[in-house]
Image: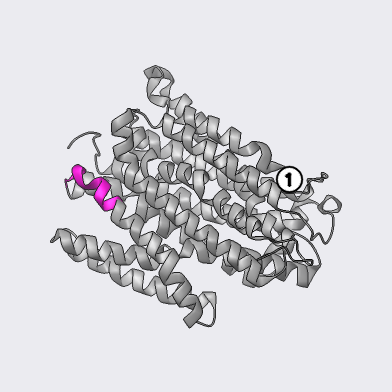
Amino acid sequence: MSETKETGFTKSTAWSFALSQGGGFMLIQATVASFISVYMTDTVMLPAAVGSVIMFIATLWDAINDPMMGAICDRTKTRFGSYRPYLLWVPAVLTVVSIFLFRSDTVSSGAKVIYFATFYILFGMSVTALTMPQMALIPAVTKNDKERGQAIQLGIISIAIAFTIASTFTSGWVAAIGSYAPLMAVYGVLAILANLWLFRSSKERYHVESANKRSVWKDLGVFVKHKELVVVLFVWMLSSVGYGIMFSSSVYYMMYYIMRPDLIGLYMGILSVGALVSMMVVMPLLLRKCKTVTQVFIITQALTFVCYVLLFFFGNKNMILLYAVSFLATAFSSMEQGLINFYVNDTIDYLQLKENVQLNGMVSAIKGFSYKCGSTLVSSGLLAILAVAGYVAGAV
């Protein structure tokens, strides 16, 4: 697709957006999402109860600062636009923070809690500082639904591939090189390059009203006064809960319930391939067959529920059954991570139509806030359950 006169949207814009969301950025996030809890308890040797408190405080603060970052983005005015400038420097900050996060085991035992908590909080803030402008950028580049959809679907595929790679091969790579930190450095370089490409290939063309004329509270008020949008907020939160539980608990599940730590890589690979199939095959198929994104949500979540009921009663009876049903559950559920992005663009357009205001950053931030509220429940809740159950690191 060549550049259109109306939008300036190009193939390069679509692909660079996809790799900025997937690529190195998602490789970092996927590694942290899947392995940070077991790294903290089994490598850094922090008690699960302490880890639960750290996760709760960090993720709750991360959720709170999302609207702050969204407001900052909307109020940023430079010759490069409101959102593009952040692509130039935030990926580098994220890379440095990620490297130091996975150096927590090298710190003296008395300082490990403070060190890990500090860099885990900074990691969440860095992800927020990059995610907000990324999500807000495409609606500022084009109003064409087809172009937006192309960018989102390519982004979903890129995210799925990156998550598959990180979840499947990280354990083996870390065993070979002895540390997560070098992987974070490589992934960080990839993230920096992808975001520089997005900066060069995009142009912000659509602005409705200067956010500097409004308070942040007024921006939030514009959103919450529309009750139908509050429902969308809960959809974002619940999708985070489902996706987070699926991956963050899987390492512990194989290690301490199935008692087969040697199968962690295989099991995570099966889940990751299921996520890849979900986003690359099942989601496009259902989007063509169903009339709305909401219908796709309802169908896939119902099927996922059935799969998890089967896993609850029969998952530990037969390994083949465990693999097959886990794959199906992931193939139905993982697409929710892509579907919720369609709601972001629709919400931005809805508020521009109803209120004649541009809240790209704020809407992206509210999505991030609700998503991370769900992540708080998952991360702190999982470790709290382990602590109550008497979890002992390395017991296998």
Task: Say if the magenta span includes residue 367.
Answer: no
Please state if 301 lies on the left or on the right of 225 as rendered. Answer: left
Q: Secondary structure at mark 1?
A: helix
Please state if 250 lies on the left or on the right of 22 as rendered. Answer: left
* Structural crowding at the residue carrying mark 1, measured as other residues with C-alpha within 10 Å and reported as few (<14), some (14–19) or many (≥20): many
Which sits in the foreground, 70 or 102?
Answer: 102
Magenta stretch: dominant secondary structure: helix
Residue carrying label 1:
72
Query: How many discs appear?
Result: 1
Q: Position of residue 114 (x, y in %)?
A: 47, 25
Give the answer, above or below, for where 353 lies relative to 135. below
Question: Quadrant location of residue 65?
Answer: top right
Residue occupying the point 13% across, 61% down: 318
Residue occupying the point 35% across, 41% down: 170
Q: Position of residue 175 (x, y in %)?
A: 28, 33
Residue occupying the point 29% across, 46% down: 251
Task: Say if the magenta span includes residue 262.
Answer: yes
State the extent of the magenta-drawn residues as a range.
Answer: 259-268
- Identity, as a three-letter code, of the amino acid under mark 1: Ile
Which sits in the foreground, 41 or 84?
Answer: 84
Residue lying furthest right: 213
